């Protein structure tokens, strides 16, 4: 593939509040395809060796198997690469790595992450190919995920295992990340699955909306409930700075999740709420629009950034910009997304010759010392998703159209 030169955006334009042109999608997407190609070439023959992250200062991917919560993002990137290029090389690779995830539906869910695992991968595969085998796997995964729903609480259990502070099994825990997994349930309810899956997804979103947020609409990472009565017990964090802080990626999951829930339900409560959780995030961003890993971390501005949160949010904002009824608000959300993508597409944040990932400077689990200032696969996934969405909008298409 011809090497593409990525234009560097002058970040001063962001600092001064001037609107800049969106990054040239074809060039930046070409960069992503080139980086993905380098990763694909370097991968071991075993399709169960799935890239997850590259540590700061390293050049090699750390691999995980199909049980890891991040396992769906690499095949998802391959499907997006196929959508952009229409090159069967990417389709064949995406099929290979998607098939490696099929065993996920052969046993009970070990946590809430089935949506992350199968919908980013097999879900994109079904969207682009309509392969009936993919449809079957997705429907089975939705049924498995639904078994974690506690009707007394009104949410899906996130961690059916020992995690510090959640008091399992006496207590029921739900984390903000779980909002993303609801898309699998919505899809299944529309594609041959039990209609109760829709109701579970709506109830989970409603309960989360009621219990997971502070008065300013910043989110808690974890809410712990009494398993038997459904009563809320406490709000804590697991990956954030403190129980009272706004963990950046957690807030991005909320922005993405409630935007998606409105798309699926057309219930304006969720559209209003999506804007509220978005606005508090945007208000607190630094000038370059890339958040610190936690907005309230004690050493800001000397704290690590989180490019993954920026990538998730930029993709969500592009969708939200098409759903809001206020035209000025829609323009504002799209401009914010474009500015985030502009910064992510500079030499500061793109991996380029440093390693084979798309992006640098993501933070996974800082309190646990994991993946700090690293390249992480889900940052790359949401980055290419956002770029594809922006390309479609620039061409006058819906973000839900195929390229």
Image (spheres, helix red, strand yellow):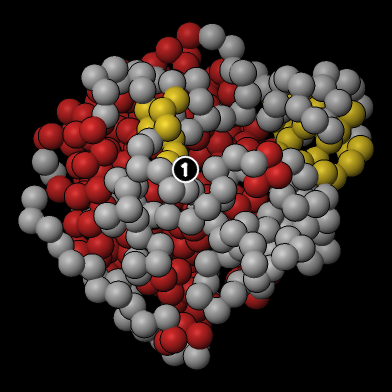
Above or below — where is 325 with respect to 315? below
| x 65%, y 71%: residue | 301
Q: Position of residue 365 (x, y in %)?
A: 63, 43
Secondary element under disc 1, as helix, strand or loop, is loop
Q: Position of residue 210 (x, y in %)?
A: 79, 50
Q: Nearer the viewer, residue 147 or 340?
A: 340
Q: Position of residue 312 (x, y in %)?
A: 49, 54
Alpha-carbon neighbours of circle 1 within 10 Å: few (<14), some, or many (≥20)? many
Q: Residue furthest top?
A: 106
Q: Nearer the viewer, residue 54 or 121?
A: 54
Q: Can you see residue 397?
A: no
| x 76%, y 21%: residue | 162
Above or below — where is 113 with respect to 326? above
Q: Nearer the viewer, residue 196 or 159?
A: 159
Q: Residue furthest left?
A: 2
Q: Can you see residue 47?
A: yes
Q: Is residue 393 left or right of residue 378?
A: left
| x 68%, y 39%: residue | 368
Q: Is residue 229 left or right of residue 56?
A: right
Q: How many numbered dots are placed on residues in this image?
A: 1
Above or below — where is 223 with respect to 110? below
Q: Residue furthest front?
A: 57
Q: Is residue 282 left or right of residue 70?
A: right
Residue that carries the numbered disc 1 in the rendered image: 55
| x 56%, y 48%: residue | 372
Q: Quadrant of residue 235?
A: top right
Q: Position of residue 275 (x, y in %)?
A: 62, 66
């Amino acid at each position: 593939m011809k090497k593409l030169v990525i234009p560097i955006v002058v970040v001063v334009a962001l600092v001064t509040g001037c609107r800049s042109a969106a990054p040239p999608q074809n060039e930046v997407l070409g960069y992503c395809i080139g980086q993905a190609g380098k990763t694909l070439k370097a991968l071991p023959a075993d399709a169960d060796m799935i890239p997850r992250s590259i540590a700061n200062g390293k050049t090699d991917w750390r691999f995980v198997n199909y049980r890891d919560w991040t396992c769906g993002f690499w095949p998802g990137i391959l499907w997006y690469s196929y959508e952009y290029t229409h090159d069967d090389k990417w389709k064949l690779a995406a099929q290979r790595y998607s098939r490696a995830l099929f065993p996920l539906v052969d046993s009970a869910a070990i946590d809430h992450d089935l949506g992350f695992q199968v919908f980013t991968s097999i879900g994109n595969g079904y969207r682009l190919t309509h392969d009936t085998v993919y449809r079957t796997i997705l429907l089975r995964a939705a049924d498995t995920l639904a078994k974690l729903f506690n009707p007394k609480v009104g949410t899906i259990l996130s961690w059916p295992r020992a995690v510090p502070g959640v008091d399992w099994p006496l207590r029921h825990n739900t984390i903000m990340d779980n909002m993303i997994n609801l898309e699998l349930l919505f899809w299944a309810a529309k594609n041959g699955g039990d209609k109760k899956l829709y109701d579970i997804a709506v109830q989970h979103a409603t309960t989360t909306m009621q219990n997971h947020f502070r008065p300013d609409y910043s989110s808690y990472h974890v809410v712990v409930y009494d398993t038997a009565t459904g009563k809320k017990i406490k709000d804590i964090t697991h990956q954030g700075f403190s129980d009272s802080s706004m963990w950046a990626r957690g807030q991005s999951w909320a922005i993405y999740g409630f935007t998606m829930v409105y798309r699926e339900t057309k219930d304006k409560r969720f559209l209003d709420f999506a804007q509220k959780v978005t606005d508090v995030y945007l208000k607190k961003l630094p000038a370059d629009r890339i958040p610190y890993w936690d907005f309230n971390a004690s050493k800001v501005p000397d704290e690590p950034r989180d490019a993954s949160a920026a990538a998730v949010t930029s993709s969500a904002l592009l969708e939200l910009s098409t759903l809001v009824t206020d035209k000025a608000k829609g323009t504002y959300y799209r401009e914010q997304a474009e500015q985030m993508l502009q910064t992510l597409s500079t030499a500061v944040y793109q991996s380029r010759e440093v390693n084979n990932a798309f992006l640098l400077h993501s933070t996974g689990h800082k309190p646990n010392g994991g993946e700090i200032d690293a390249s992480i696969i889900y940052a790359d996934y949401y980055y290419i998703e956002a770029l594809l969405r922006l390309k479609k909008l620039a061409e006058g298409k819906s973000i839900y159209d195929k390229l």
